[in-house]
Structure formats: structure tokens, C-alpha cells
Image: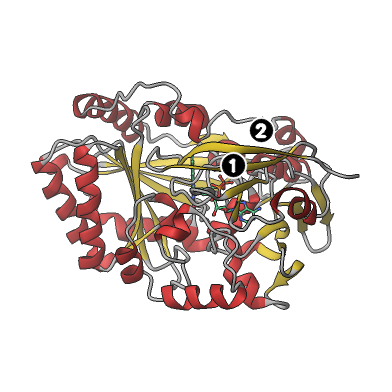
Amino acid sequence: MISTFVLDSQVDFVSFDGGVLARGQLAKPSQSALRELSDIEEKVLSGKKARITRGAGLSCAASNFGDGITTVDNSRFTEILEFDSESGLLEVQAGSTLAHIHNYLSEIGRYLVVQPDYPAITLGGCIAVDVHGKNQLKDGNFRHQVHSLKLFHPSRGIVSASRAINNDIFELTCGGYGLTGHIISAKLQTKALPSPLMALYRVPVDDILTMPELLVTAAEECDYAVSWHDFSARGAAFGRGFLLIGKFVSAQYDLRKASKSALPLYWPLDSHSRKGVDLALYSLPFNRLVNVLYGGCNRFNTEPALSAVKDCLFSDRKKRELYYKMFGRAGFHESELIVPAEQFSLFIKSIENWLDKNELAVTLASAKAFRGSQSLLRFEGEGVCFTLNFPRCAAGNSFMQYLDALILELGLTPYIVRDSRLPLSVVTHAYPHYDDFKGRLRQYDRERLYRSQLSNRLGL
Ligand SMILES: Cc1cc2nc3c(=O)[nH]c(=O)nc-3n(C[C@H](O)[C@H](O)[C@H](O)COP(=O)(O)OP(=O)(O)OC[C@H]3O[C@@H](n4cnc5c(N)ncnc54)[C@H](O)[C@@H]3O)c2cc1C
């Protein structure tokens, strides 16, 4: 069947955090029956150079669009292609969302061990960013469960890549920000779901400086471990919070019951809907009130709770949509950093010191344990992965600059896809393999066809 495309000649794109605006073109397939990506090439892109693929568009960085660049929307390609029950390998088109994959797998009592926690995120976005899930320390990054992938590049056609064949392309594509071409599909290693239910435990944390050790122990012993901290409290209460630990319950449950509660396939949150309502509600007093209520409810609720796996993997879905929309049109900053354990205390004290002197509502402060060594431009390393959110305002902008300086001073690693303004100088300092990535990318694609605002900003 021949597919037709809709081409919008001028589209205003905005990054999910509201920080980057650009005008480009949008190529959107109007049918879902596309088999060969060369259709796009012939009908839409012939004669045009710069292009980039877009998944759900949920990255904070402008990695899926750019000025004068054609964004190729991949969201219609959601077919589950094949499941091999012996090996547990699932082949899926790259536009499939985590919800598509979860719904298919939960029916057969399986799951993906590594997944970011919003169901609308696509497989292509997970591979191209090499995302992490709720327990990176134990399970590694997303690419560890990618067996192989099919990649389209106009000068190479469709190429299969895995650890065994075209390993160079595989490595460059996993965490390559879409710059090696258009991922069509991938084979993923799935695992047997131990149970459709998880037990969730909340452990109050009074001293944030104990987190590196607590997180590692929890991550090693459990299936997931994430902490939450109150950065609006001052003095001894600064950073108090709780550790949320999840464990599959060992009792046998009827898997058919779990399969009945499929995840919806439509999720309303994207970069345009996020800024649709101009609320901008986050002030420091409001932030303090919310943190006291949220922190209090969780810190004193130490009874274990049973929860469906989907509600643990994709937690607080509805609340998150409201949470992001409340930043309004101006948007928000997100900074996610790997902090080596030996620098953690200095990192926290520096932030506390800055927040004591400046008025800024830190709406999220959360941590996970990370393990592994950093390679190419992938967000990996040893230490505590710390996430901060705050409004995009004058104080927020100067806090970001302060964090840039801390990255250099303390040897932290920033997550490239979470920060839409991360300067090149910080990236080259924090990512020792930057030149290697850039050189290999140029060797792979001398014309540098796949581009985005992110790749332009980072000189890739
Ligand atoms: C609510 C929320 C929760 C999140 N939680 C986590 C988390 O727990 N862990 C984590 O690591 N991240 C997390 N993220 C970040 C998110 O996982 C990444 O930004 C992810 O890349 C978004 O995927 P997407 O489908 O929206 O892709 P997009 O944002 O559209 O694109 C991201 C990158 O992938 C490329 N890409 C997409 N599809 C393809 C394709 N088919 N072929 C080639 N390249 C492609 C794009 O070119 C771009 O470079 C979260 C984001 C949100 C909004």
C-alpha cells in the first residue's frame, strides 16, 4: 500500500520545557500502513537536506526539531511486529509508545524492565536518548534491553544493527539523539512479569546526606527505588523527604486480572498542550504548602501499599499532567545530574546555600542510584542521579547558571535531553567522549543530514 504524507510547510515548534522555539516543517504520515521509510524520502524530503525524527515530542531539549529543519513525525508507526516466546524477544515499530508495549506484554505476563515513567513516550525516543527507568543501578539503561534495531538513512537504506552486526551504528544510535537516521523498529528483550502487583514502601528520610548509601542499598535489594525531597524547607529540615521502594510481591496472582486494566493509548500531554493554560502557579509559599502536605502524607504513611505494576512503572500520570501545566507558558527548567557519592554532601550544601539567598520554588527534588561508566554522549555514570525542577524565571535562569558552574567544579554529569539550554562548554567538559561521538557521527554521515536545534547547539 502506498502511503501519503501531509507536509506542513511552516510549523512553530516548542520544546517541552517551553525554553526553545523554532520554525521548521512537519512531515506527517496520514496512514499507518507505511512499511518502507523510503516513501518519506521520495515524497517529502527529496531535495531537502536537514531532517530529524520525532517520537512523542516529550523531551525538554529541542532534540526533535530546529529552525529550517523538517521534523518527520513517527507517531503513527505503532505496530507490534513479532513476539518470540522462546527468546522473549519482541519486535515493535519505533513509534509504539510504552503504553502500546505495556498493554501487549502484560497480556502475556511479560514486561520491559527499563522504562521511563510516562506511557506516551515512544520506543524511538527511548533508544535515541538511551533513557533510564526506576532502577538504573540494577537494570542499566534502555539500550541494555535492545537486542537489535532497523535504521533508515537515505544514503544507506535500511540497515540492521545490533551488538553482533554493524555494532558501530548500534552504539552511535543508542543515545545518538536521532542523528544517525530514522529508527524504524527494534527487537527488545522482555522479561517474565514476576507478579502483576508491587508492594510499595515509604521510608522517611530526615537527613538528605544519608541518601547515597540508602539509595544504593534500596536499589540493590528492590525492584525500584526513588526518593523525594523538600527543598522549600529551611534549616535542619532542608531536604527531608522519603524513599519510595517497590518490590514485586512473591504471592501468585492471576495474570489475567492484570491484563484487563490496559493503559489508555492516548495521553494529552505534549509540548503544546503543556503550555496551553497560562497558570504559572508556582510561587515559593505555594511550593512550601504543597511540599508540607505531599511530604507529610508520604513520610507518615509507612504502611506498605499494594499497587498494580502499571501504576508503579507509570506513577501519578494524571497529577503529572497538571503539575507540568501549572508552570504555564513561561515553562520550567529541568536539571538532572549524576553526582558522584563523594561530592554529594558538597552538592547539597551548595544548593542549600544558594536557595537560602535566593527566592526560587524548587518544585521537584528527587534522586535515584546510578551505576556504570559513561560512554559517547549517554547519560550514565556512578553516583546519585538528582533531578530538580523549577519555574523558568529570572531566579530559575540564574540557578541554572549556578548549576553549570557546579557541574564543572564538582565533576557532575548533566542529562543532555533534560536541559534545553545546556551550553556546549559544559557538555564538552562533562562528556569526555564528546569528540569521539562527533568524529564517529561525521564519519558515518559526511553530509550530516539528521540535525536538530540540540545538535546545532552542541556543534554536532
Ligand atoms: C513525564 C516525563 C517523564 C519522564 N521520565 C523519564 C525517566 O524516568 N527516565 C528518562 O531517562 N527520561 C525520562 N523522560 C524523558 C524522556 O524519556 C525522553 O526525553 C524521551 O526521549 C522522550 O521520548 P519521545 O518519544 O517523546 O521522543 P522525542 O522527544 O520526540 O525525541 C527524543 C529524541 O529521540 C529521537 N527519536 C524519536 N523517535 C525516533 C526514531 N524513530 N528514530 C530516530 N530517532 C528518534 C528524536 O530525534 C530526539 O532526538 C521523561 C519525560 C517526561 C515528559
Residue type at tag 2: Leu
Q: Is residue 340 left or right of residue 46?
A: left
In the picture, residue 228 is in which quadrant?
Answer: top left
What x and y, as percent, mark residue 243? 36, 45
- Is residue 114 at least partly visible in the picture? no
Q: Secondary structure at mark 2?
A: loop
The residue depicted at 68 percent of the width and 43 percent of the height is 102
Q: Which residue is mark 2?
A: 263
For residue 166, above or below residue 60: below
The yes-or-no answer for disc 1 within 8 Å of ligand 1 is yes
Task: Work out how far the residue at label 2 is from the one at label 1, CA to CA, in angstroms.
Answer: 16 Å
For residue 133, above or below residue 206: below
Residue type at tag 1: Ala
The residue depicted at 34 percent of the width and 28 percent of the height is 297
Q: Is residue 357 left or right of residue 424?
A: left
Residue lying furthest right: 1
Q: For the residue carrying disc 1, how many other residues have a C-alpha within 10 Å: few (<14), some (14-19), or many (20+)?
A: many
Q: Nearer the viewer, residue 408 or 292?
A: 408
Marked residue nearer the N-terminal end (2 or 1): 1
Q: Quadrant of the N terminus?
A: top right
Q: Nearer the viewer, residue 449 or 323?
A: 449
The residue depicted at 68 percent of the width and 58 percent of the height is 183
Q: Which residue is mark 1?
A: 56
Q: For the residue carrying disc 2, how many other residues have a C-alpha within 10 Å: few (<14), some (14-19), or many (20+)?
A: some
What x and y, as percent, mark residue 178? 58, 58
In the picture, residue 311 is in which quadrant?
Answer: top right
